[in-house]
Image (cartoon, rainbow, N blue to C red):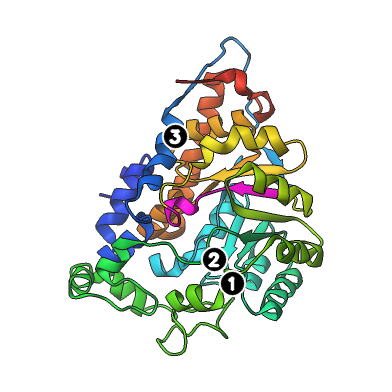
């Protein structure tokens, strides 16, 4: 199977499954507990039907949107995800370059493997910095100051990960950073030697946003311990309000699901919220973001930019979210599988396919601009 054989999300996933050692594929692919929320994230879109209009003159289709003060050529963006150079040596460099090619926003994680500064110098497309709330308040301030100096456009605080989710696939394989593989996990690496050759013949794996705090060589701190020891489960709304004031710019919260929390985000001065359950990787059984979208847009959509992520595999999924009132949607696994399969070429192919699907689907819907999408286009079963 080659990259040219990939025509949709499922093809990229299969190519990644064939190329990656099992523990790494399952780290991308898996969710928490019984993975019920992971499945519901995509299933939620299937309970909603599109109602197209015809004869509307749609020879020219404009996919551009504005979100959190950023002009995007497409209504989708590349969500920040951790450890990207573990999946392919190009990592965030490939994702940032592909996002720049399609004129959209990309995110860099606190657990990213390329520095904010390098990516900001390489591309002038909107850049998001996703970070976590640490027990050490001075560390939070220092990370925000660094992002400000680097020229980051949007700060994104993840609020659904004050502790790590129960990802049982990783427990079975022993996946962790540094690796603590089970015998079965080691055997899966042995039968996929191409990944190991790629990993060992390129620059060493680092976490430049946290390299003073997390030791990748297996010393002071593992990523598991980072979540359990450095992140602060005592985080409260007042703490976040202080950060919003300190940043004094575009600031969004990622991991909002309830209407009550969406209203609080508005009250403390956030400019955006991302409805998300962390791709089904945190609280299993939690509500799918798409199922919460309408009531949250109704509650706060006139005062704050509402986005969502989770389960998006098709252009029609994007159209359904936009029709309910989302300003844009985030992609995660959608670009991680092609990144793992083929680096920058894979991410570019995936984003190009999504763009082509959206143009085609917009024409079939009878819409020439995103602003023409509305709930009149939808029916729920």
What residue sits 45% from the left and 75% below the top?
Answer: 223
Horizontal side, residue 61 vs residue 198: left or right: right
- Name the quadrant containing residue 200: bottom left
Find residue 259 and report its horizontal and vertical position in percent.
Answer: 64, 42
Of the pair 1 and 28, the residue shown nearer to us:
28
Find residue 317 and report its horizontal and vertical position in percent.
Answer: 49, 34
Task: Name above or below for residue 266 compared with residue 158.
Answer: above
The residue that mark 1 highlights is 232
Task: Name above or below for residue 82 compared with residue 288.
Answer: below
What residue sits 43% from the left and 90% below the top?
Answer: 219
Of the pair 277 and 232, the residue shown nearer to us:
232
- Name the quadrant containing residue 4: top left
Q: Nearer the N terminus, badge 1 or badge 2?
A: 2
Q: Residues within 10 Å of mark 1 (few under 14, many from 20)?
A: some
Q: Secondary structure at mark 2?
A: loop
Q: Residue furthest top?
A: 55
Q: Secondary structure at mark 1?
A: loop
Magenta span covers which residues?
272-283
The residue that mark 3 highlights is 44
Q: Residues within 10 Å of mark 3 (few under 14, many from 20)?
A: some
Mark 1 and 2 residues: CB-CB less than 8 Å, in contact? yes
What residue sits 41% from the left and 51% below the top?
Answer: 284
Horizontal side, residue 145 vs residue 345: left or right: right
Looking at the rendered image, the disc whose residue lies closer to the viewer, 3 or 2, is 2
Q: Is residue 11 visible?
A: yes
Q: Is residue 278 magenta?
A: yes
Of the pair 378 and 114, the residue shown nearer to us:
378
Looking at the rendered image, the disc whose residue lies closer to the viewer, 1 or 3, is 1
Q: CA distance from mark 1 to mark 2?
A: 6 Å
The residue that mark 2 highlights is 162
């Amino acid at each position: 199977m080659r990259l040219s054989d990939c025509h949709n999300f499922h093809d990229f996933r299969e190519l990644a499954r064939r190329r990656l050692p099992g523990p790494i594929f399952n780290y991308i692919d898996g969710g928490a507990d019984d993975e019920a929320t992971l499945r519901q994230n995509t299933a939620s879109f299937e309970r909603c039907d599109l109602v197209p209009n015809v004869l509307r003159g749609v020879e020219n289709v404009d996919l551009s949107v504005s979100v959190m003060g950023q002009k995007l050529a497409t209504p989708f963006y590349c969500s920040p995800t951790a450890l990207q150079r573990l999946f392919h040596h190009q990592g965030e460099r490939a994702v940032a370059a592909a996002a720049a090619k399609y004129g959209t926003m990309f995110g860099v994680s606190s657990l990213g493997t390329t520095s904010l500064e390098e990516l900001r110098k390489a591309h002038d497309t909107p850049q998001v910095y996703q970070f976590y709330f640490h027990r050490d308040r001075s560390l939070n301030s220092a990370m925000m100051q660094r992002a400000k100096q680097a020229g980051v456009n949007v700060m994104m605080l993840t609020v659904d990960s004050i502790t790590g989710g129960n990802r049982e696939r990783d427990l079975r394989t022993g996946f962790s950073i540094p690796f603590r593989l089970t015998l079965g996990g080691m055997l899966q690496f042995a039968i996929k030697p191409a990944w190991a050759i790629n990993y060992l013949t390129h620059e060493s794996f680092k976490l430049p946003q946290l390299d003073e705090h997390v030791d990748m060589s297996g010393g002071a701190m593992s990523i598991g311990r980072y979540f359990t020891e450095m992140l602060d489960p005592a985080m409260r709304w007042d703490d976040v309000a202080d950060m919003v004031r300190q940043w004094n710019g575009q600031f969004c919260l990622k991991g909002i699901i309830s209407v009550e929390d969406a209203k609080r985000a508005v009250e403390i001065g956030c400019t955006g919220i991302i409805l998300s359950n962390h791709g089904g990787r945190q609280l299993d059984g939690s509500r799918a973001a798409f199922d919460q979208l309408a009531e949250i847009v109704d509650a706060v959509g006139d005062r704050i930019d509402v986005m969502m992520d989770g389960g998006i595999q098709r252009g029609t999924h994007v159209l359904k979210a936009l029709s309910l009132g989302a300003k844009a949607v985030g992609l995660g696994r959608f670009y991680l599988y092609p990144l793992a399969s083929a680096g920058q070429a894979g991410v570019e192919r995936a984003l190009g396919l999504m763009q082509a699907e959206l143009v085609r689907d917009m024409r079939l819907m009878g819409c020439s601009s995103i602003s023409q999408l509305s709930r009149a286009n939808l029916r729920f079963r």
